[in-house]
Every structure is written in structure tokens, then in C-alpha cells.
Amino acid sequence: MALELLRDTAIPKTAAVYPLQWRSRVYAIVGLVSLLGVVIAATLAIGSTHIPLATLGNILLAKLPFIGVESTWASSMETIIFDIRLPRLLLAGLVGASLAVAGATYQGLFRNPLADPYLIGVAQGAALGAVTGFLLPASWQAASIPLLAFAGALLAVAVVYSIARVGKTLPMTTLILAGVALGAFLAAITSYLMIASGDKLHGIISWLLGTFSLTSWWQVTMVIPYISLGIVVIWLHARPLNVMQLDEEQAQQLGINVERVKLILLGAATLITAAAVCFCGIIGFVGIIIPHAVRLIWGPDHRFLLPLSTLAGASFLILADTVARTMLAPTEIPVGVITAFLGAPFFLYLLRQKKRAIF
Amino acid sequence: MFNLRLDEVSLGYGKRTVLHNISLEARPGEMLGIIGPNGSGKSTLIRGITRLISPSSGQIFLDGQNIASMSHSDLARLVAVVPQNPVLPGLFTAFEVVLMGRTPHLGFLKYEGKRDLAIVQRAMEATQTAAFAERRIGELSGGERQRLTIARALAQEPKIILLDEPTAHLDINYQIETLDIARQLCLEQKLIVVATLHDLNLAAQYCDRLVMLCDGKIHCHGVPAAVINTQTVKEVYGAEVYVYPHPINGLPATLIASRKDTSKPNARAM
């Protein structure tokens, strides 16, 4: 359309409404960032040793340079905060963010509301890797379980990908079917190994349900590079992902290099999912419920859906893990039990509230 | 002058060739109709021009440049498609879907500016879709969605619009409305419009030139009166029809004549 036609036109009505939608979503991002801050502070304070919020504030302030705060607290409190609770909540936050973003990405890529991060074999690959690790001598387990889980997840998706690929294209239906079939095959092997594992069964089952009970700093520093890289790459592809909500032909006719975007997004989502599950096991439900909840409240635009899911997923899993470690303390409940127990009713409530189409 | 040129193009899927050695040319301000029976390769032609499939031989040129050497977004800035039965995401608003038409004009990390929003608004006014800009796609009728994809094509600011069976699922009023819009855009903005059409009457009424495909080859081409007649329709479609000049404008009008005995005394009496 010729530019001259546009010059004297004021921004028309609908175009003026559009920035307003943006404003509410920016408020949402600010709101969720604050929520995450509150959740982190509360989680640091809550536990078998209760730490008053004022003390917590002072301990955190004392860590900052140039601020002199006189130490009036037991040094054990510092240990609890910095060596036990902080790494654990950071890992929970990273994992929650990864699973939620990966879920949103898969749902967008497959244009299927049932897609979750484990759809194309990540979980089954990771589980087989981890169970193999459990069967190794005890002294090797700490290192081998996460490594084998990570490798198993990536390998499973790589096999699914290479099976489903036709020439230069990747038909998504074939990808799902190949993922489901290979997943069943790997799950069969995993089940067999579990039966044969004897007294290690308890450890395996609690890994499979997901837990953060043994988190320390080295695990956080191991996964941070993969997860932050993967999430940033996915965020950057939000607009192509929007356009791909049309079918692939239309997306390509609108100038999107569809095959390349699919490959990048599948790779990034698989990477962050593998990094998320390798230390803490297969935590269900976050990847499916958080993106849907965000979509129900703030709409389907991936430029907001992805960052909002990241923030909501992090807050949600930190909260769930706090419940998991405090509800029956000193016994830990697997966090996967809590995510479903807390998340499902909230999600069903949202579904009832908004009766329009959800995807 | 900008033009679209196909030079001895063969297109197909895998080993199966659907179109053989097609050569044609279209110029701005011209509406070109592609007609032919089911399976004659009409949609394949459109898929070839948008590079969803690559020619097994021959070349396609836009303004003298071979499309095989263009990037996806370069091509999308020149060619927009109004697909047959498009999948549209139900939760997005009509405005957001038309805004997707701006995709090829935006850089990787660039957000839509005021100019993009104004172009979208113009496109929606031109297609009479602005009234439901805020509604979600899932709530719209088939005719509204069809017009919305035309608006999206316009928002691409293309030089060529390809319409793939634009009237296939529309009632007669929307058929006329859709093609009126296409024709008007073609003339006012000097676009090249290429439409595949099943309906020979619509093709004759709206297109400046027609190409009749048969078994993947061009059976005949030219102005409607030269392409559509009782003889060619029988040869290409195998259908018994009677073609006569339209009483108002003299363009060829096609009447069906069933092979069965359709003498219905009651109907005739009315």
C-alpha cells in the first residue's frame, strides 16, 4: 500500500487499542517478577529452622559490599540459607522455568494443547539413563546418574528426530508418533531394569517422581549455562513461533524459514528439558499446566507467553518444593506429587472461570 | 515493469510430475485466472510460485530474478498467498492475524511500529474486516476468515497476490464480494493477481486472461471468450455444458446440461 495514503491518517482506532494490550502484559511481567521475589524470600525463611524475615534481610544485606551489618545471628543460619536453601530454591526455580518454557514451546510447535516437554522421548530417555546409573556401584552414582540421564534424554530425542526426518523436512505428526513409540520401548527397558534392581527400587522411584532433596551449589552451576542459553534462544524465536500457529505452509509464505525454526526450537527445548530433569528427575505437570494457565489469563502471543511462563514456572516449582520439604518434615514428599496436587485444582478452577476455547 | 514469468516450469512431488513445461507471464493490474479440473495442477502451480516446492526443471522469475535465489522473507515481501481453507489460530484476535502479514518486513528482533499498525488498519478497512478486529478468530465465520486472509496478504504489501480457490467454501454473495475486492485491489494498486478457480462463470466475469490446465499442461489460454466455450469445457472437464454470451456483458457464461434425462414435467411447468 502506498505510503502517501497513510501519511495524513492518524493512528486508527484498533491500532490504538493494540498498545493497551501490551501495557497489561508488561504489568503482568512486573507482577510476576515481584511474585518471584516474594516467593524466594518466603522460601528462604520457611523450614525446619525458622528464620525471621528481619534476620533474613540482615543476613542478605551483610553479603552485599559496602554495607556494614553487625552479625547478631548464629552462623548456622547463614549456612542454612546459603548452602542449603538457596541452591535448592535456585535449582527448583531453574527447573520450573525450563519445564514451563519447554512445554509452551512444544505446544506451539506441535500446535497441540496436549504437548508437554516429555512428548518426544526426553523423559523416557532420561529415566533409562538414570536407572542405569542407579545400577552402577554406589561410589559412581552421584556423578553418573545425572550424566546418564542428560545423555539419555538428548540421545532419545536425537533418535526420534532422525527417524522422523523425511529428506529436508520434519513432519510433526511423524515426530510425535516416533517419540511415543521409542518412548514406550525405552520405558519397557526401564521397567525391566527396575524390577531387576532389587533394593535400589526406592531410590529409583523417588528419582522418577522428582525431588530436590540433595541439591547443592555444583548442580546449580552445572545446569545454569544450558538452561539460560536455551531459554534465551526460545524467547528470541517468539515471533516466528506466533506465525507458526498458522500452518507451516502459511508460515513459510509469510517469510519464516520453517524448517530452521523447528530445528532450533526443538533443540533448545530438548536441551533445557534434559538439563532440568538430569538432577531432580521427571517432574510432571509443570510443563503442561503453567503455559495453559498463562495462555488463559494473558492470551496466546508467545512474546509474552514465553517470558510469563518462565516466571510463573519458576515461582510455582519453588513453592511446590517448599511444600514438599516442609509438609511432612523431616520426611520429603516427591515434588512431582505436590505439583499435581496443587496445580490440578488451580488449573481446573481456571478452566471453569474462562469457558471460551483455551487453545 | 514488474512481472511474473514462468519459463518451461515442471513441478511435482517426489518422482511424480504434476505440471509439465508451463510457461506464462503476468503483468501488474492484470487478473490472471487458472482453471482446470481437479488434479490438473492448479494448486501445485501456486505452491511452486511460493517455493513450497521447487521446479524439477525450468525457472520462475519475479522482476527478472529467479525465485530460487531469494530468501524466504524476500519472496514474502513480493508474493502473498490467500490459501484455500487456511488454518488460523483460534485464540489470536483478527488484528493479530493480519499483523502477521508484516512478518517479512520486520527484522529478527524488531517489533511492529506505528507504520505497521497503520498498514494493517488500512488493509482491514479495504477488506471490510476492521469491524471485527478485536474479535478472536475462533468466533468468526468462514467468509470473515477468508476476507481476513486477504487483509493479511495486503498487509504484506506484495506485488503479487495468489488466491487459491478463494471462493470454494463461500456462498454466492461472499464469492462476489471476495472477487470484487481482489479485482479492485488489482486495478487500484497495480497488483498482479493470480487466482485458481473452479467456477467457470466467476473466472470469466473477473479475470482478464485465463489459463486452462489439463493433465498438467496448458490446454489453451487467452481472454475468457477464447478459452471458455462448449468445446474446450467438454474436452478438458469431460462435462456437457452449454456456453453462451452473458446477456449483460457478453462474457462467456456456462450452463450445465446433465447427461441424465432431466425432463421434470412439474419443474418445467413452473
Image (cartoon, coloured by chain):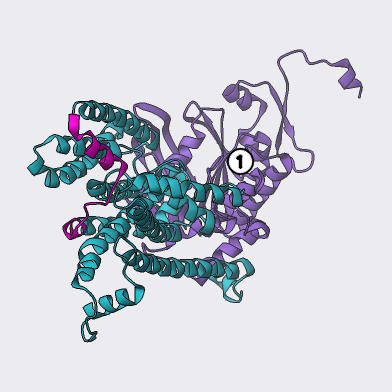
Considering the image in quadrants, where does the C terminus of chain B appear?
A: top right
Q: Which residue is mark 1?
A: B223
Q: Is residue A175 magenta?
A: no
Q: In this orientation, does residue A2 appear?
A: no
The secondary element bearing badge 1 is classed as loop
Q: Residue at x 59, y 64 (%)?
A: B121
Q: Is residue A21 left or right of residue A340?
A: right
Q: Nearer the viewer, residue A155 or A131?
A: A131
Rendered residue at 20%/36% (across/down): A131
Residue stretch rendered in magenta on the structure = A198-222
B5 or A73: which is nearer to us?
Answer: A73
Residue A222: percent from the left, percent from the top? Answer: 18, 56
Disc 1: host chain: B
Q: Quadrant of residue B20?
A: top left
Q: Determine whether B124 is above or below A341 in the image.
A: below
Q: Position of residue A199 (x, y in %)?
A: 18, 32
Residue density around tag 1, few if under 14, some if 14–19, many if 20 or more, within 10 Å: some
Chain coloured cyan: A
Determine which quarter of the picture holds residue A15.
bottom right
Chain (purple): B
